[in-house]
Image (tube, rainbow, N blue to C red):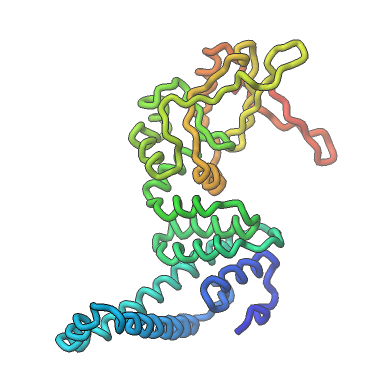
Amino acid sequence: MEIKDLAGLSQPLTKLVEVVSSAVGTVYRPKAIRDEADAQAYAKKALARADTESALESKALEFSSALDRVQQALKDHPQLAERARNRLLAREVEGQLNVESIADFASEALPPAVSSQPVNADWRRKFFQEAENVCESDMQLLWGKVLAGEVTAPGTYSTRTLDTLRRLSKWEAELFRKACAIAMSDGWIAVPTGDLNESLKPFGLTYTDILSLRDAGLLMDGDHIHKDFSQSPRAPDGSARPVVLFNNGVMIELSGASMAALRLPALLFTRAGTELQRLNGQAETPEYLAALAAALRQRGLSVKRGTDVPQGEGLSVVVFEQDL
């Protein structure tokens, strides 16, 4: 079967099929158009790959000092070779199932249109080398979203982010989801009181959790990091212009005389954290926004929430009249 035989696929899905197929050595067919007979076909192909691997390993052993030990082991245990062959088969089949599950999740996450730019070959190779070892459904979903994002816009996720994702546990992924629920869209979290031990506990992040996210490569190290707004653009009269922050769909305007010296205690996402944040679409967290607004008002700032005001013909403007 060739890719051209899969007629009727959308442009995004066709590109995904090409990317997955070039990585796994056979035409990937999305779950929606696969039939039950595929399982046996894939098992046969995996068996052939396992036989090839066994042959290559045997060839290498002929030139190694371990050959005598292996030959003796086979004499002592006649079924050893068969067990090794079955192990390779099981590994290949499981890896194939993992890759196809991730590809299925990716197909569900594709937008209506994607870039015509090809996915980088090095990135593709690294992705699928690691993807075959991802067995947890929740993590497969995460990997599928990464694949869909890269197919949509190549260069969205770096290979270093793939390294971070490879080491990420399900528990760490859940911690990161909690962090994204209160994070600004450009990859940082304002710490309302500045106390990392207590300030974020009500929103699901203890100091131990913060350390875990640093160890996972998602947060930058440092307990005394600040976002500095003192260099923000100035109005003609020299006063600080308002600053607009974006937090999970909420636009927040900060203004006031104290903007000129504003430095907010913060947690900063790493590059990998910032890239993976895009996968964590979140609703607003009202309790966190209320705590942040209260802390900012104590600094003498006006804190307003943006509201879309329709202007007719599908147009709207954002006004900041409502207190956050």
Q: Kindly give the residue lying farthest to the right in the view shown.
A: 313
Is 179 located above or below residue 223 in the figure?
Answer: below
Q: Position of residue 250 (x, y in %)?
A: 61, 33
Q: Kindly give the residue lying farthest to the left in the view shown.
A: 76
Is 143 located above or below residue 24 in the figure?
Answer: above
Q: Position of residue 15 (x, y in %)?
A: 65, 67
Q: Quadrant location of the C terminus?
A: top right
User: Is 95 in front, or is 271?
Assistant: 271
Q: Quadrant location of the N terminus?
A: bottom right
| Apparent side of residue 20 relative to residue 98 in the rendered image (left or right) | right
Q: How many marks?
A: 0
Measuring 46% from the left and 38% from the top, which residue is drawn there?
A: 179
The answer to whether residue 291 is seen in the rendering is no
User: Is 218 in front, or is 190?
Assistant: 218
Measuring 69% from the left and 29% from the top, which residue is drawn there?
A: 307
Q: Position of residue 63 (x, y in %)?
A: 31, 81
Q: Position of residue 305 (x, y in %)?
A: 63, 26
Is 112 located above or below residue 8 in the figure?
Answer: above
| Apparent side of residue 64 relative to residue 304 in the rendered image (left or right) | left
Measuring 53% from the left and 80% from the top, which residue is drawn there?
A: 35
| Apparent side of residue 110 relative to residue 104 in the rendered image (left or right) | right
The answer to whether residue 35 is seen in the rendering is yes
Is 255 located above or below residue 54 in the figure?
Answer: above
Q: In the figure, residue 146 lies in which quadrant? A: bottom right
